[in-house]
Amino acid sequence: MSAMPCGCDEEAAHVCMEHLSETNHAPCSATAPASTAPKPGSPEWRKQRPLYSGVLTYFPDALMEVAHCSWVGNQQHNPGQPLHWAKEKSTDEPDALVRHLLEAGTRDTDGVRHSAKVAWRALALLQREIELGR
């Protein structure tokens, strides 16, 4: 159990959900564990991330739905603007992900599958987590 009020655990070396969902909040004092992973951008690092063969070929239909989810969201939140993620407009990925997960297998009022929105929110959560770690 964490002794920190935010829920971060320095011994477990993780960032709490509070810090992940607040874009203007500095990460907590927890630090990432030491890693022997290859340097980001190096040939070995890139080979360990087979984006095409390890993601795109596994989930082509699902990724098309997530891309459509992005497009529909852009039409709703940024009408008339080129496709982009307006990160400041929504920072509650964990809560939104679970809301959509509760309705998995059905479509939202905009016609997008709730499961596609779950996947989009999971990717958004992971992206923010990675960006906080940089």
Image (spheres, rainbow, N blue to C red):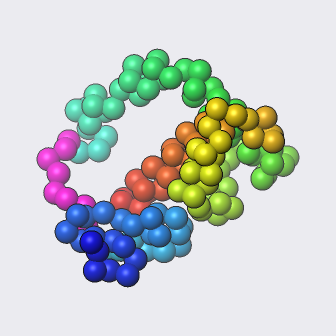
Q: Most extreme residue toward the front, as rendered?
A: 102
x, y percent for residue 87? 62, 58
126 left or right, relative to 11: right
**Which of the image's four quarters has the N terminus?**
bottom left
Q: Residue at 73% x, 45% y: name it.
A: 73
Along the horizontal axis of the image, is 75 left or right of 88?
right
Q: Quadrant of the C terminus?
A: bottom left
**In front of the other: 72 or 45:** 72
For the stretch drawn in magenta, the main secondary structure is: loop
User: Residue 131: where, in percent of width, then height?
Assistant: 43, 57
Camera-nearest residue between 54 and 10 = 10
Q: Is residue 112 above or below residue 22?
A: above
Numbered label tally: 0
Tell me if residue 36 is in the magenta stretch: yes
The residue most toward the right is: 80
- At a point 85% along the width and 46% down the height, the residue shown is 80
Residue 111 on the magenta span: no
Quadrant in the picture for residue 75: top right
Q: Position of residue 95 (x, y in %)?
A: 57, 58
The foreground one among 2 and 60 is: 2
Residue 82 visible in the picture: no
Q: Position of residue 24 (x, y in %)?
A: 53, 73
For image coordinates 63% across by 26% down, the residue present is: 64
The residue sitting at 45% across, 49% down in the picture is: 126
Magenta range is 31-38
